[in-house]
Image (tube, rainbow, N blue to C red):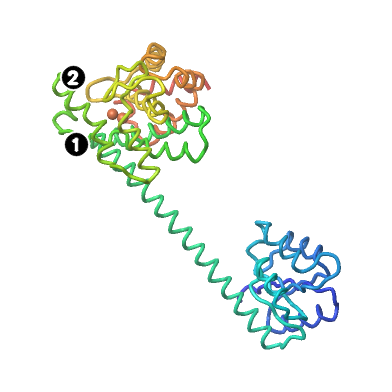
Amino acid sequence: MPIKQTILVVDDVPENLKLISAVLQDAGYTTMIAPDGQSALELANTHHFDMIMLDIMMPGMSGLETCRHLKVDPQTASIPVIFLTAGDAKELLSKAYRVGAVDYIKKPFFKEELLARVGLHLQLQDYKQNLEGKVAQSIKEMEQTQVHLMYMLGGVAEGHSIETHLHVKRVAEFTYLLAKLYGMEESEARMLKDASSLHDLGKLGISDKILHKEDRLDTRELKEMRKHAHLGAKMLGNTALPLLRMASIVCKQHHEKYDGSGYPEKRSGEQIHLYARIVSIADVFDALLFPRSYKRAWDIDEVVAYLRNNRGSHFDPQLIDLVLEHLDDFLLICKRERLMLSNQAQKKMGIFALFKRLIVAK
Ligand SMILES: [Fe+2]
Ligand SMILES: [Fe+2]
């Protein structure tokens, strides 16, 4: 059985309330009544209504005033309001539309007309809500697809193994945590989290021979590898999309160092964008804690010592202080992400010691 729609009828004349309610109920609607504007507002805040029929001329708060209140309250703003009016003065009617009414019905009313208009506006409202729901769902799906593709692309750019995909994911989590600790607003921190997944996008333009070389890179290879910073920003191009613009900054500047000894532009201090200063720490923190083809996984004490030693030279000192102050929160991310790895992979990556330390610390 379909759910009955509920209509609130507001009128200071009891006979009108009775008559309108009877007509609506006969047509299958549920009704509630209010004798004045104030009680209508109270009812609208405590009950769900699909429509409100509002008399314009009422002692105390007028119908127009009541409608104005309904339309500024987010909880009631979307309920369609139909005015009931004895007059049809143009000025009054234009005021009624200005305060947000969808229609008006002249008193004394003609039953069929009243039901036709009520039915029409309820149907329109239904379409509107349905459409809004579908649009919101589509936007959500598009955003999820976009983020999924970004992480996938970031993972592919880093290499082709599960470890590098997880590196991208962990860097994103570290980035978000550090951005929040720094005081960045939620929406910006979330965006930076996703943008960080593309920090090494430019590696797509670096040959596999260099990318997967097990030994240390020689000077020529290192020079080639370093091109990935500039290349990533170039790939993203001159976009107006905020998320990709952010990713472009991160690509370009994530290997700059606080003392100006990094690449590609030798920026220093706050010339390096905050986004890149944050992602740079997240990237190195993860790269040290987990093994790469050319290095073993470092012990957490070694990582902490490295961060301390490079505080102010490689890394922004203020951000490093935040990491060291909240180290356990960063390690918890590692603990959470370990579920993504098989036991065998964990052994191989030698991070058991790290989790053991974490369990002892907790
Ligand atoms: Fe990089
Ligand atoms: Fe990385």
Camera sees residue 51: no
Residue 291, quarter of picture: top left
Q: Which amino acid does the dot numbered 2 rest on?
A: Arg
State the residue position of label 1.
205
Give the mark nearer the N terminus: 2 vs 1.
1
Counting other residues with Cα less than 10 Å from the Cα at mark 1, is it few (<14), some (14-19), or many (20 or more)?
A: some
Amino acid type shown at disc 1:
Gly
Observer-nearest residue: 174 or 82? 82
Q: Is residue 163 above or below residue 33?
A: above
For the N terminus, which image quadrant? bottom right
Q: Residue at x 33, y 22 (%)?
A: 267
Q: CA distance from mark 2 to mark 1?
A: 19 Å
Q: Nearer the viewer, mark 2 or mark 1?
A: 1
Q: Is residue 172 above or below residue 113?
A: above
Return the x and y of residue 164 as percentages of the image width and height: 29, 33
Q: Residue lying furthest front in this view?
A: 91
Q: Secondary structure at mark 1?
A: helix
User: What residue appears at the point 34 percent right and 23 percent down from the top-left corner?
Assistant: 284
Q: Is residue 75 visible?
A: yes
Q: Which residue is mark 2?
A: 216
Residue 27 sits above or below residue 145 on the image: below
Task: Answer few, some or many: residues within 10 Å of disc 2's Cα (few below 14, many 20 plus, some between 14 and 19).
Answer: few
Question: In the image, 97: left or right of 61?
Answer: left
Q: Residue 190's x, y, as percent?
A: 46, 39
Front residue (pair 327, 284): 284
Q: Secondary structure at mark 2?
A: loop
Left or right: 362 with respect to 102? left
